[in-house]
Image (tube, rainbow, N blue to C red):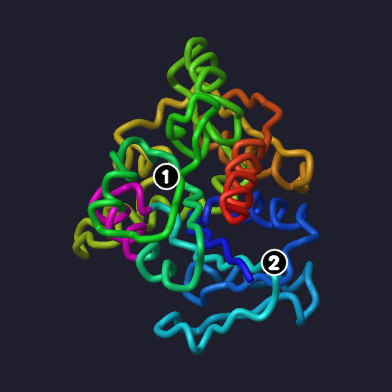
């Protein structure tokens, strides 16, 4: 009986659901219950029968999460926008990996460098003595992907090619299209009442300027995947772009990077 552990950012909900659905040999999916996993739990329950999924309320002991089938996947979803604070994302990714390692044979992190907030994540996990084999999303050269944008647009080269045309661009993935308002909420969570009153009078463009230091987005690039609700995705891109009077460009995305990383995990289990 083998298990793959997946530690994933909430931004990858749609892509992770699609990835798991491609493997009929996955006998059971175990989802770690937390605030960030509620939407993914709903998505799982709408796709799979009750017998195929399990919700783990805690991961304190292996005897409470016994292996039952030949191939199982344990999924731990972490909050969107952790990358805003480098220490937060490092701490949470390490903690999630340490929490899940005693239940799995391999850990796949659905993360990139996240604007370098994660930094040398491999070395960090080694130093924290994560004992099972693990990997992060990488390109065909074995380099860690810069972020979720690079992973879904296909490569760092494609990402940089878009930036060559204009650096005033906002990339919109399905996850970003769903969760971007929470970016502003997270960035302003600890402000005092006076500052909050000021924020309440700002429009979205002003809030982005305050939160990210930039809001001059000339172009919104939607990274569209073939399995998503395209009408809904494009409507969300349009709504976002309207705040900045931005041009909208749609590019075809791919989950090949996620798929290749998962295939590598499965091969590692065969050793």
| Image quarter in which the N terminus is found | bottom right
Q: Nearer the viewer, residue 63 or 23?
A: 63
Tell me, yes or no, if residue 4 can be seen here: yes
* Outermost residue toward the bottom in this view: 64
- State the separation of the CA atoms marked 1 and 2: 32 Å
Magenta residues, dominant SS class = helix
How packed mark 1 is, by other alpha carbons closer than 10 Å (few <14, some 14-19, many 20 or more), is few
Tell me, yes or no, if residue 40 can be seen here: no
Quadrant of the image occupied by residue 38: bottom right
At horizontal 42% and vertical 67% (from top left) the residue drawn is 101
At horizontal 50% and vertical 84% (from top left) the residue drawn is 57
At horizontal 74% and vertical 75% (from top left) the residue drawn is 52
- Residue 79, given in percent of the width and then of the height, sits at 43, 60
Quadrant of the image occupied by residue 120: top left
* Marking on residue 203: 1
- Residue 113, given in percent of the width and then of the height, sits at 38, 38
From the viewer's perspective, is the residue at label 1 or at label 2 nearer? 2
Inspect the magenta stretch and tell me whether residue 46 lies in it: no
Q: Are marks 1 and 2 in contact (CB under 8 Å)?
A: no
Sequence-earlier tag: 1 or 2 = 2
- Residue 86, given in percent of the width and then of the height, sits at 26, 48
At horizontal 70% and vertical 36% (from top left) the residue drawn is 224
Residue 75 falls left or right of residue 253? left
* Outermost residue toward the front in this view: 271
What's the magenta region?
A: 82-95
Inspect the magenta stretch and tell me whether residue 88 lies in it: yes
* Marking on residue 43: 2
Task: Identify whether 41 is placed above or below 168.
Answer: below
**Mark 1: secondary structure:** loop
- Residue 177, given in percent of the width and then of the height, sits at 59, 46
How packed mark 2 is, by other alpha carbons closer than 10 Å (few <14, some 14-19, many 20 or more), is some
Q: Nearer the viewer, residue 243 or 161?
A: 161
């Amino acid at each position: 009986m083998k298990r793959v552990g997946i530690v994933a950012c909430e931004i990858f909900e749609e892509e992770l659901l699609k990835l798991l659905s491609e493997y009929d040999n996955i006998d059971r999916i175990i989802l770690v219950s937390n605030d960030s996993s509620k939407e993914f739990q709903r998505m799982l329950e709408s796709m799979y029968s009750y017998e195929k999924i399990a919700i783990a309320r805690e991961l304190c002991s292996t005897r409470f999460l016994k292996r039952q089938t030949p191939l199982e996947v344990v999924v731990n979803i972490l909050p969107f926008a952790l990358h805003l604070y480098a220490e937060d994302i490092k701490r949470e990714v390490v903690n999630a990996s340490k929490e899940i390692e005693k239940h799995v044979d391999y850990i796949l992190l659905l993360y990139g460098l996240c604007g370098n907030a994660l930094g040398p994540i491999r070395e960090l996990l080694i130093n924290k003595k994560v004992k099972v084999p693990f990997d992060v999303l990488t390109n065909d050269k074995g380099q860690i992907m810069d972020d979720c944008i690079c992973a879904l647009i296909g490569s760092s080269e494609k990402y940089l090619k878009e930036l060559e045309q204009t650096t005033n661009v906002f990339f919109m993935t399905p996850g970003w299209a769903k969760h971007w308002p929470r970016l502003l909420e997270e960035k302003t969570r600890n402000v005092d009442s006076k500052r909050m009153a000021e924020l309440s009078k700002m429009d979205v463009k002003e809030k982005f300027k305050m939160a990210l230091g930039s809001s001059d987005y000339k172009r919104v690039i939607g990274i569209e995947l073939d399995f998503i609700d395209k009408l809904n995705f494009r409507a969300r891109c349009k709504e976002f772009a309207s705040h900045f009077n931005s041009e909208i460009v749609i590019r075809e995305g791919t989950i090949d990077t996620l798929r290749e990383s998962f295939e590598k995990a499965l091969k590692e289990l065969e050793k």
